[in-house]
Amino acid sequence: MDVDGLKVLADPLRARIVALLAVESLCVCHIVEETGAQQTNVSNHLRALRRAKLVETEREGRFTYYRLKAEAIEALAAQLGALAAAARSPTRKRACP
């Protein structure tokens, strides 16, 4: 289970940024405009998302555009799906000593 990836997504602002990046590639100024968050705060959250390998960057002139890595999100979703499938199977109980 990629606990680090899930922890990164647990922050409400990061989750909002991920939702925005799912639709289109954006630079920091666009994300600041969309979220109302401070530029330094957005940059710090993007750094965390990059370290978790959930986003990638593309330089265009003096701007850096951020893009969501669909395969990373799909991997997290698959892990959660596997947990859900395990929870659906007949419940086993471990015997107490």
Image: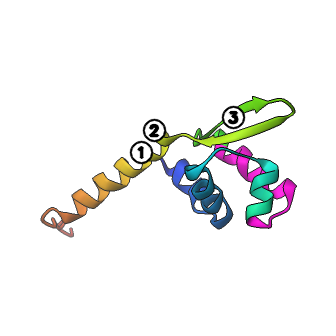
Please check the rendered image and state whether residue 37 is part of the magenta-colored stretch, yes or no.
yes
- Determine the secondary structure under disc 1: helix
Dot 1: within a 10 Å radius of its alpha carbon, few (fewer than 14), some, or many (20 or more) residues?
Answer: few
Q: Which sits earlier in the primary sequence, circle 3 or circle 2?
A: 3
Q: Which residue: 72% across, 39% down?
A: 65
Residue found 62% across the figure and 41% down from its top: 67
Give above or below for 60 relative to 81. Answer: above
Cα separation, mark 1 vs mark 2, equals 5 Å
Between the C-alphas of marks 1 and 3, the distance is 19 Å
Q: Residue at x 41, y 43 (%)?
A: 75
Residue, disc 1: 74
Residue beneath disc 3: 57
Q: Which mark is drawn over residue 71? A: 2
The correct choice, above or below, for 42 with respect to 64 in the image is below
Along the line of sight, which residue is nearer the eye, 17 or 8? 17
| Amino acid found under the numbered disc labelled 2 | Glu
Corner quadrant of residue 50: top right
Measured Cα–Cα span from mark 3 to mark 2 = 15 Å
Residue 89 at x, y percent in the picture: 15, 62
In front of the other: 57 or 2? 57
Q: Which mark is residue 55?
A: none
Along the line of sight, the residue nearer the viewer: 8 or 22: 22
In the rendered image, residue 71, in percent from the top left (x then y), is placed at 45, 38
Magenta stretch: helix, strand or loop mostly: helix
Going by the image, does 22 lie left or right of 32?
Answer: left
The percent position of residue 26, horizontal first and vertical second, equals 70, 47
- Report if residue 24 lies within the magenta region: no
| Label 3 SS | strand
Q: Are marks 1 and 2 in contact (CB under 8 Å)?
A: yes
Quarter residue 25 falls in: top right
Report the magenta residues as a range: 35-49
